[in-house]
Image (cartoon, coloured by chain):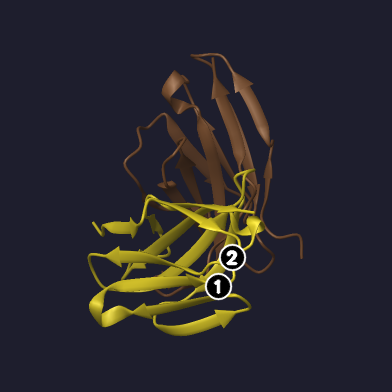
Amino acid sequence: DAGVTQSPTHLIKTRGQQVTLRCSPKSGHDTVSWYQQALGQGPQFIFQYYEEEERQRGNFPDRFSGHQFPNYSSELNVNALLLGDSALYLCASSLALGTGATEAFFGQGTRLTVV
Amino acid sequence: GIQVEQSPPDLILQEGANSTLRCNFSDSVNNLQWFHQNPWGQLINLFYIPSGTKQNGRLSATTVATERYSLLYISSSQTTDSGVYFCAVDGYNQGGKLIFGQGTELSVKP
């Protein structure tokens, strides 16, 4: 079991550009959630995908969008990058259980730097 | 929404010492997890513990759901225990959306 995998591990982008981050969930999981972690802070929930749809969303602008594919993998897209978007982006996978979910497992993260 | 508070924010220990980290949360939860974040940013699962007590080697955790807190115990600490420890909760009907505390940064000195 490869666990949750994310790519790329590091990325440097210029302000105003667009970026796409990718996540493959743990085998057997159907739900993917994305988190942003600024330096010295706890991870903040961006959004969650289940059955190829955005199921819930945190307090992030529309510049942040995502997608889930039929194989449950997911992408996070950020448009019009700002310096403040520099952070560690974490992907978590879990299995939906009614209105809840099983234990979440995280990937190693993508460290995005916007210059 | 649910608020999660961790204490202490920082902790410095000598190797071999024991410690207790606390997590308070403001509402009933479906799930509570403890993580250790290594220097490279990876969140390592320690415990999935919505209630009760669990032990894994030198680490153990207790969640008292009715009083809305959880404790993580580290015994005989080692330098490899250094890093940031996060508590995260999933409220009822939240579909697995985790709310994280600010973390406890632990430094174990040789």
Badge 2 density bin: few <14, some 14–19, many ≥20, Cα 10 Å: many
State the SS at label 2.
loop
Give the side of residue A103 with respect to residue A61, left or right.
right
* Colour representing chain B: yellow
> What is the count of numbered marks?
2
* B17 or B103, nearer to the observer: B17
Q: In screen coordinates, is B70 left or right of A12?
A: left
Q: Quick check: A99 left or right of A52?
A: left
Front-most of residues B39 and B95: B39
Look at label 2 and name its amino acid: Ser
Residue B75: numbered disc = 1
Residue B77 is tagged as 2
Q: Would residue A30 be seen by someone viewing this image from the given angle?
A: no
Q: Residue sitting at 45 percent across and 36 percent down?
A: A38
Q: Measuring 39% from the left and 82% from the top, which residue is drawn there?
A: B51
Which corner quadrant of the image does residue B100 belong to?
bottom left
Residue A114 location (% of width, % of height): 53, 20
Q: Is residue B44 above or below residue A91?
A: below
Chain of the residue on which disc 2 is drawn? B
